[in-house]
Image (spheres, helix red, strand yellow):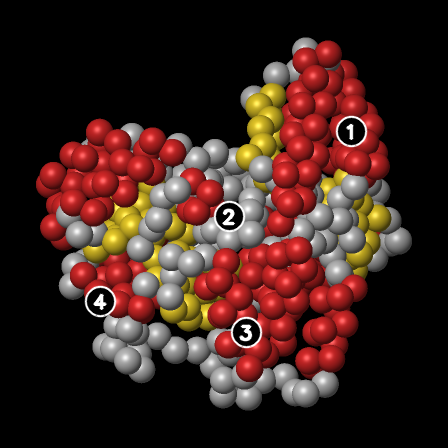
Amino acid sequence: MAKENLKLFKEAKKYLVGGVNSPVRSFSYAGGNPLFIKAGKGPRVFDYQGNNFIDYVLSFGALILGHSHPAVLRAVKKKINAGFGFGATNKTEIELAHEIIKAIPFIERIRFVNSGTEAVISALRLARGYTKRDKVLKFQHSYHGHADYLLVKSGSGLATLGIPASSGVPRDFIKHTLIAPYGDIDTVKEIFSKHGKEIAAVIVEPAGGNYGVVPPDIGFLKNLRKATRKFKTLLIFDEVITGFRFNYGALAQALGIIPDIICLGKIIGGGLPIGAYGAKEKIMRHLAPLGDVYQASTFAGNPIVMQAGLSTLNILRKLKKDYQRLEELTGFLIQSLKKEAVLRRISLEASNYGSMFSVKFNRKALFQKFHRGLINNGVYFAPSEFEANFLSFAHTRRDINETINVVRRGLDKISVVH
Ligand SMILES: *Cc1c(COP(=O)(O)O)cnc(C)c1O
């Protein structure tokens, strides 16, 4: 397909590494030519050839209201007329901070940064500064952005011995990172009995969205809360994806498990670059200018970003009750997809947690065929089986029905090669 897309990809590769600014966009997993998106409206995105797609990527989960929500767009346009940023605090920063703290009452202070990665890096520095300890424990397959010391995978043998997951990360940089399989409380307990008093923080995604969709293991999370309390280690929930995704606030509240620090991003910026971290005042006051943990940023709290976030949350707050509908719609899509696969004797794993879903095949080649089939028929799923897909409040039953029709065709393509 896609003559214009092919042309753009060639051109992009001349100047951008691999033609992209973030690896998964290159479709290196999905195969084929990546999409080049010109615009988005509601549940759809438009490429440069005039094709449109029902979008389940939604800026990797940031756009819970869909693309170009008219009220958000209006507010951002108005805000931009006042200037692009000042390096001084703006009223909108206070308002967004207040709104988030109202929605997530277990935090008392918040600090805005520019990305989820930055939020995680800063939260861990704060945890280390607060506890005066060096080690952090993370879980296998979890993703927390691209900080050096979190790009670690478990090596063979001992669960606690990691190896760098990226070239360019010195072994020395990961010597304080402990790693355990998610859900394995025995290993966690073993690690704590050995290193408990050296562990500043445990960082976890309360629901995983970066290794397919991993629903919360509530028993495990409760045990983590217990273990961290016992050793005065801070529990950090990385809610960069999950914050405001399943309810108006943090997933932590819905699960009834309260972390010490929360990291946010994606949805709270309404589609513009953002990250944030928050905790009780007694922890947050360790940050500069009040405390001795340094963290700063030229663009943090940018008024246009703050406005996009604030307008998004103001709309979301009124949609509180509709989260249920969004979850049902997602469930319907996944159930239908599974049914169609069974009819064709195609084995796949499809699951959703709330409005987040993933589809995994038992062979990469099948996923690639499926993904391409969907694209050719106007449906855009995440270009990797390991990335989550999302619904937005702009997706209607009709969009879902249309998607299911396209899924049928995509699966037909596979059953032919089967
Ligand atoms: C997206 C994501 C990040 C990184 O956020 P960026 O804004 O891409 O830096 C961190 N943690 C989780 C759980 C994420 O989903």
**Numbered circle sitting on residue 343:** none
At 80% from the left and 56% from the top, the residue drawn is: 41
Q: Which mark is residue 95?
A: 3
Choose top left, top right, bottom left or bottom right for residue 380.
top right
Label whose residue precedes the other's in the sequence (3 or 4):
3
Give SS at disc 3.
Answer: helix
Q: In terms of sequence position, does the residue under pointer 1 or pointer 2 come before the other?
A: 2
Dot 3 crowding, Cα within 10 Å, few <14, some 14–19, many 20+: some
The amino acid sitting under disc 3 is Glu
Disc 1: CA contacts within 10 A as few (<14), some (14-19) or many (>=20): some
Task: Say which amino acid is labelled 4.
Answer: Gly
Counting from the top left corner in percent of width and height, residue 52 is at 84, 48
Q: Which of marks 1 and 3 is nearer the N terminus?
A: 3
Task: Give the numbered dot on residue 404.
Answer: 1
Q: Is mark 1 on a helix, strand or loop?
A: helix
Whole-percent x and y of residue 30?
64, 38
The reply to whether the residue tagged 3 has its Cβ within 8 angstroms of ligand 1 is no
Dots 1 and 4: beta carbons under 8 Å? no
Q: Mark 2 points at which residue?
A: 242
Going from N to C along the chain, the mark reached first, 3 or 2, is: 3
| Quadrant containing the N terminus in the rendered view | top right
Q: Can residue 17 be seen in this view?
A: no
The answer to whether residue 1 of the structure is visible from this angle is yes
Residue at image mark 4: 129
Name the amino acid, label 1.
Ile
Number of marks in the image? 4
- Give neighbour class at mark 2: few <14, some 14-19, many 20+ (Cα, 10 Å): many
Q: Gap between marks 1 and 4, in whole Å? A: 50 Å
The answer as to whether callout 2 falls within 8 Å of ligand 1 is: yes
Which structural element holds mark 4? helix
Please name the amino acid that badge 2 sits on: Thr
- Judged from the image, the secondary structure of the residue bearing numbered disc 2 is loop
